[in-house]
Amino acid sequence: MKVERVAQVDPRDLKPGQWVDGWRIVRRIGSGAYGVVYEVEKDGQRFALKLACHREQSGDPRQTDARAKREVACLQQLHHRHIIRMWAHGRWPEPRSGFLYIVLDFVDGYTLGYWVERTHPTPHEVAVLFLKLFDALEHLHGRGVFHRDLSLRNIMVSQDGEPVIIDFGAADYAAAEELTDAPLPPGTPRNRSPEAVSFWTANRHNPEARYPFKATDDIFALGANLYDVLTDPSPERSQKRPPLGGVMPPPSPFKVTQGRVPQELSAYAMHLIASEPRARPATAKDARRPLQEFARFEHPEWRGLPIHPIASQLPPEPAKRGAVPSAAGDLAGKVPRYAGRFLGLVGALALAVLAAAMAASLLHGTTSPAPTHVAREAPATQPPTSALAEKPTSRPAPLPSPLPTPEEASPSVNQPENSPALTHGVPNPSQVQKASAQRALSKAQKCALLVASLSWVAAGCPGVQTRPEPELCPEKAVKAMEQELDWSLDSGETLLVTVDVTKGKIPRRTSKREETMTVFKDGPVTGALSEPNGKAPEGTILEGHLWTTGDKIVGRYFRARLPNGRTVPICLELKYGGMFKEEGSKPGKAVGRKEADAGGVTRWR
């Protein structure tokens, strides 16, 4: 009777206490592109139950079912202590035509990213953990199965410290039917191999192209996870990062951590993510061998200290609205990134000193504030030398977000020139000095006079990167994206967007640069979905804002306007921290692609 009572319930809306073929729902764990996962209970034991659910934008509902059957086929071939185990599968509520479900181990622990933050592992503990993961990968490949999405979120670490590879929703095996309807299979862009990235670049507009996924792609992905574990103190909070398989190799873990990662482990991690396939291990067994040796090392540099200082893993304190975050506060709380950003910090400090000197030269005897006062104040806000040495990749805090909440903002293509969004919400330079004095000064003099103040940005002075501040997405927007639009948040799922509808889309099957690029400026923007996603069809209007003064074009969209006229709040941002500027970019005129990848988020990055 209980099954009959639940039969009319949407699979994504099952409540605690309801039943699926004898498995009692405890709580919903999460949902993804092809299903929803619940914690369930039977005979006093806990399990995870995954229900395959068709999504409305799919042209063929059988594809979702086919993916679930392929996941079952993969899991039936795998029996390894570090790979999620399948206990049962079936259909619900009807045994022939119902939704396919899979019952799996319930792993009580953390994702690999959270494990780094919560346990503060030493180099030895990381080496032992990845030795077990490569052993599992060898078992997996030995049975002809490819995982295809080995990410920080698809590797769990139990309370006992044992790693488990989970989520075979994107997995494939040698004799499987082709289900991918895009050049690349579903996966995490950060962890794609260089050859996969190159294939995507060359074939993203070719609907017939299919990338031949190989064992070396899984090896690269696991190596990318190792690199992030070694270099990022809070990898779970750092999801909008460029692919490691890009053109420029990243700095080594030894360099990023100032030697806290031993050179042998650092070199091994770089070996796994080498740009040339021939320079990487050909098999998981080859990749596992060095880790066996590392696991025997007893030296204090391997077992004595955690890879990341615990202070660097504490979450940053939220900045007060309207306040200017100090560099010292930022370095104490922000997550370190690549070493190049440290050079940016040094450059910014040098620029401040230079500007102060210019102020002294230009304004000597004509202004009341003593220029030497500015020069004395700047160093006082910086962290001590030891802090800089410990966290060399930290960067200055971004300016507070100048934008209203999605409930307050209503940007349009033609916004008044005096809009707070266009002026970045900072005081007009005339509020810093008297209007008459400002009119008499050149731009160089104004910049020198405004050193160390937010008005520097409003005056158009060089050397300042204005970016929105990280913050939580409003609850209303999260609910609207999940329930009304059926978007998968923080999952790596990509939405292709037309950045600015006034610039147009990229014509299909074109290779002409002039047809793919356009010029963007700071300010409100109206974009659109280039492809359908969830319940949002192609052409759904997106209202948001662009920032173009840094090294990337950063974009956020706050509202979606559906064809039926309904408007819902959203949190959609350009992926990988924004688009890189293209050749020909100038101050105030950033050249970028007309279309870009975006993702729905629960927290602005």
Image (cartoon, rainbow, N blue to C red):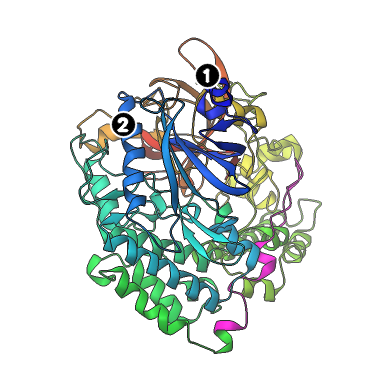
Q: Quadrant of residue 502?
A: top left
Q: Earlier in the sequence, mark 2 or mark 1?
A: 1
Q: Position of residue 24 (x, y in %)?
A: 59, 37
The residue drawn where x is 39% and y is 34% is: 519
Q: Position of residue 298 (x, y in %)?
A: 54, 89
Mark 1: few/some/many CA within 10 Å (<14, 14-19, 20+):
few
Please state which of residues 419 and 190 is positioned toward the viewer in this rendering.
Answer: 190
Please state which of residues 479 and 50 is positioned toward the viewer in this rendering.
Answer: 50
Say whether residue 220 is left or right of residue 509: right
Q: Which residue is mark 1?
A: 8
Mark 2: few/some/many CA within 10 Å (<14, 14-19, 20+):
some
Q: Nearer the viewer, mark 2 or mark 1?
A: 1
Q: Position of residue 201 (x, y in %)?
A: 26, 46
What SS does tag 1 mark? loop
Please provide the residue range marked out in magenta. 302-327
Q: CA distance from mark 2 to mark 1?
A: 22 Å
Q: Which residue is mark 2?
A: 63
Residue 403, above or below 212: above
Note whether residue 603 is visible. yes
The residue drawn where x is 68% and y is 53% is: 451
In the rendered image, which quarter contains the C terminus? top right
Residue type indicated by callout 1? Gln
